[in-house]
Amino acid sequence: MIHLTIFEWTSFFGRFHPLTVHLPIGFLFLILLLEVLNKFKKLQINSEIISLTLLVTAISATLASILGYFLSLEGGYNEEILEEHQFQGIGLAIFCWIVWILSTDWLTSKATKAKLFYFPSLIFAFVLMIITGHHGGNLTHGESYLTENIPYPFRSWLGMPDKSDIPKNEIATKIQNPTEAQVYTDIVKPIFKQKCEQCHNATKMKGDLRMDDVKLFIKGGKHGVIFKANDVQGSEFIKRILLPESDDDHMPPKGKTQITEDELTILKWWIEQGASFDKKVSQLSITNEVKPILATFGIGNKSNIVEVKQDKYIVEERILGINVDEVEKSSIDKVKKSGGLVLPLSQNNNYVELTFLNNPKLSDDDASLIAIAPTQTLWLKLSNTQITDKSVEFIAKLPNLTRLHLENTKITDNSIKSISTLQNLEYLNLIGTNISDASIQSLSKLKNLKKLYLWKTKVTEKGVENLKKALPNLVVDLGITQQQMAELEKAKANEVSDDVYKKK
């Protein structure tokens, strides 16, 4: 128990290393600049101020070294680079103290020639700081972090590829030969490289996991394999992506660039299709859900690609074939004034998407805006707003509604009773709401429903089974279950124990 307490304290203080490490960096740069200006008679600074600043630099460098050591105890770093970085950090702290001593009047009064070593020592400390910082950046962000954004023409001088050839969003890269594209190498791997490999590479191996090497990726990390072919629910890395961002086990960690919906769809599709590392796109089945995403690569329109036959949004297509009157301009202006948007769905008719994604403060007080275009609204997006069950009466006034987003709102089972009257509804997103199995009976009345999202709700697997009996063609995404969450918590507890054991 004592070991665990010590580890918890060192882990807590170690997280302050990135904060304290910037103090000696800033001070050393400032002191060197002032001394250079002083040598060229451009500026005159009192030597006592310089000496005091150097003392603060030495103290902060020492503190950063200690906290850096605490942070290293968490593990997951390349031992060779970590060891180099540690010795460089300690050496930098020592040299900061040497430079401070050389700057004091006390030493120069004892040894007059000591002053000759002051400026060279300051320059050496500055160079050592750059080298130490470079290794620290490699440990934290990967070896290419400090060089990946080098601008032209320096890139060509260094023999690096032109920056324009490197896409900002690698999943949207156009592939030259779509049907010949390798699913893992050309589509899945770029997602991992952009979102996961910062913490799981040869330099930094959080949880003893590497994702930059196929063999090591298949092997998994500290707690075993992280994915199972043909089993999305049983794949550990999918579970972690679906966890709330505030959860310590959520991946990528809070503050890092997150996996997008399209990227998650691609990753799930890859798992469902067998998690192959050598198959081409033409060898897999392309679902309707993944097809528009693959189209961004130039994939999906080739005749030799096998497609999975799925239910289309038949009701929506039928409604789109019947035109309605235009939405009044005054109504559009009211929605815009509230922070919402009225977006056309097609050039051939007047149906619209009504979205309040830009107004998370939308509440029941403004709920009447939801029904401002009752016959024209086919899609309604109220995600992350403040609406409650009181607003649902206005949603029920949209007879042609086919797609409804209510994720992360305050609605309850009472809302589903009202929504069940929307017989044209084909898509319903209830992620992060307070919905439970009490809503199953009401949901079963939505006979045309094809897609239902229930992540992070109180609906159980048993409830989904009962719903599927009533709506056998419905695709339900339950995300991570309570049982899976409990397994993650257990794994998390074991991970702490493993780390403590290693430190004994």
Image: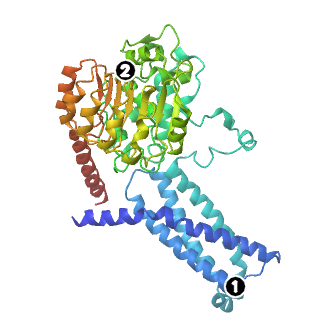
In which quadrant of the rendered image does the N terminus lie?
bottom left
Q: Residue 14 versus residue 390: which sits nearer the camera?
A: 390
In which quadrant of the rendered image does the C terminus lie?
bottom left
Comparing labels 2 and 1, the label whose residue is closer to the camera: 2
Specify the amino acid type for callout 2. Gln
How far apart are the alpha carbons under marks 2 and 1?
Answer: 70 Å
Q: Secondary structure at mark 1?
A: helix
- The residue identified by callout 1 is 47
Asked if residue 326 is positioned above or below residue 68 in the image, the reply reads above
- The residue identified by callout 2 is 273
Q: Going from the N terminus, do you reach mark 2 or mark 1 first?
A: 1
Residue 14 percent coordinates (x, y): 41, 63
| Residue farthest right in this picture | 41
Residue 215 percent coordinates (x, y): 41, 32
- Is residue 21 visible in the rendered structure shown here? yes
Q: Is residue 335 left or right of residue 416?
A: right
Could you tell me which residue is drawn at 46 percent across and 29 percent down?
188
Could you tell me which residue is drawn at 48 percent across and 40 percent down?
195
Residue 329 percent coordinates (x, y): 56, 33
Q: Residue 377 versus residue 139: which sits nearer the camera?
A: 377
